[in-house]
Amino acid sequence: MTALAQFSVAALDLDAIATAAGRVVVIVTPDGKLGQPARRINRVTKGALARFLESDGFEALKEGEAKDLAYPTGMEADAVQVVKLSNQASTALCRKAGAAIGAALGKADALVLPGSLKRVEELSLGIALKHYSFTDHKTLDEEVTVPAVTLAVTKPESVDLSTVTALAEGVFFTRDLVAEPANVLTTTEFAKRLVELESLGLKVEVFEEDRLAELGMNLLLSVGQGSVTPTKMVVMSWSEGGDEAPIALVGKGVVFDTGGISLKPGAGMEDMTMDMGGAGTVSGVMKSLALRNAPVNVVGLVGLVENMPDGQATRPGDVVKSMKGDTVEIINTDAEGRLVLADVLWYAQETFAPRAMVNLATLTGACVVALGHENAGVFSNDDAFCNGFLKAAETEGEGAWRLPLGAGYDALIKSDVADMKNVGPRWGGAITAAQFLKRFVKDDVPWMHLDIAGVASVSSPTTLAPKGATGWGVLALNRMIDEMNAEMKKEG
């Protein structure tokens, strides 16, 4: 598993700057004025920092960007990294600046000198999230080392990194799960890693196939009929919020998706190791909640399954009865994620009577066509609930865009032989998938469907993540949960 850089907060010691090994990072405001740590660096480097600040190189930097001064004279550090950032910089800019530090961090330790920066925690989160590299299956010349990052500030008691660490650990957990190959992250291994979260105080229960059959979760089971890997459901409960009903998070966990009998084209099929991204995000949120001892009630449910072609696999045209009791004509076995979610959504409502419910899934290519890799698709039956999430996502810099639901789309999944079919026509594919899921949501339950097919794993780096798994949604959902809890306490 990928380890975070080791963060600590220390009192600013100006004399220690010259002798610090590894990297020294100094924040300089866009006007180029030198704060106390910067003045000390400038003095020991015989004016090198001031000369850089007067150069075109500093002028060309945008706020939140950084430049290395390599092997600075008069210092033991390998480099001084100069970060251009105002003291009152926004959360987004502080995280961007932190990402510049994290991207350059490498294996060396770093002494970070924030000066008078107000949002040191946000800078730290940017450092942590960008300094990520999934190397579990690489043969490396050297053992992977975890750098130590020391934040030297004048009032160390004012900087609390406990929440930063908890959030970053949750994002890393999600990224690691999404990055794992399917021969490693089987449904059994996935469930095992979730059971290990019990050490953090989560209650974790694993449902095997016989129990799923007893519950009538036939849609979920139908997806895994062609695989030797057993289908499972894992339920994680965090109950530190008193007597209120929980918020339910439901994730699609298809550890590999061939499309089943409706076989996908071979080109790009290797990317289907990320088709458990929804379950990965739910797992990361639950880990973060436990690590930061959040005073909330949340239940996370993930359906874990592998979709493979086989003599026993579900066929196009099969009709399967759901846990709810509705029947589904399976037109396309590659539209399997909605089948996984449908039964788990119904179980969540029947068992926990949640006050609100969110499901996440790498559900449709149609959503990627519509929104690209910048935004997840958001669908909801409740405006206030949806708007609260969209605000949280915007605050956290996680792109999300609401798309419509409606009776006209519902008509597109009408079946001649069953209560519904699992796909409609090509047009509006992301919406008809959401409309399918809505049939398994009770009218009085605020619900939101997040189609994260375009954002769970990306082919080029983002501001806070390298190429590959992003951990999208962990930050936004944590914030939404906190804000819903605060609002409920205010009303109570």
Image (cartoon, rainbow, N blue to C red):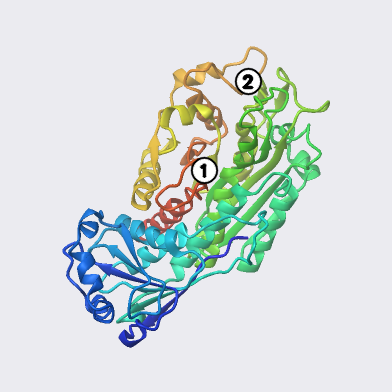
* Disc 1, SS: loop
Task: Please state the horizontal and vertical placement of residue 490, each as a whole percent of the image.
Answer: 34, 60
Question: Does 48 sit above or below residue 466?
Answer: below
Task: Please state the horizontal and vertical placement of residue 339, each as a whole percent of the image.
Answer: 64, 32
Question: Does 112 sit above or below residue 433?
Answer: below
Q: Quadrant of the C terminus?
A: bottom left
Task: Name the one closer to the observer, 178 or 222.
Answer: 178
Left or right, 316 with reference to 29: right
The numbered mark at residue 456 is: 1
* Disc 2, SS: loop
Left or right, 291 with reference to 486: right
Q: Which residue type carries mark 1? A: Ala
Q: Quadrant of residue 258?
A: top right
Task: Name the one closer to the observer, 157 or 270.
Answer: 270
Q: Which residue type carries mark 2? A: Asp
Please tell me whether mark 1 or mark 2 is closer to you in this view.
1
Left or right, 108 with reference to 252: left
Residue at the extreme right: 311
Residue at the extreme top: 416
Q: Can you see residue 492?
A: no
> Mark 1 to mark 2: distance in Å?
32 Å
Q: Residue at x 27, y 74 (%)?
A: 115
Task: Name the one closer to the observer, 246 or 426.
Answer: 426
Q: Residue at x 65, y 68 (%)?
A: 199
Residue at the extreme bottom: 15
Q: Residues within 10 Å of mark 2 (few under 14, many from 20)?
A: some
Q: Can you see residue 46?
A: yes
What residue is pinned by disc 2? 419
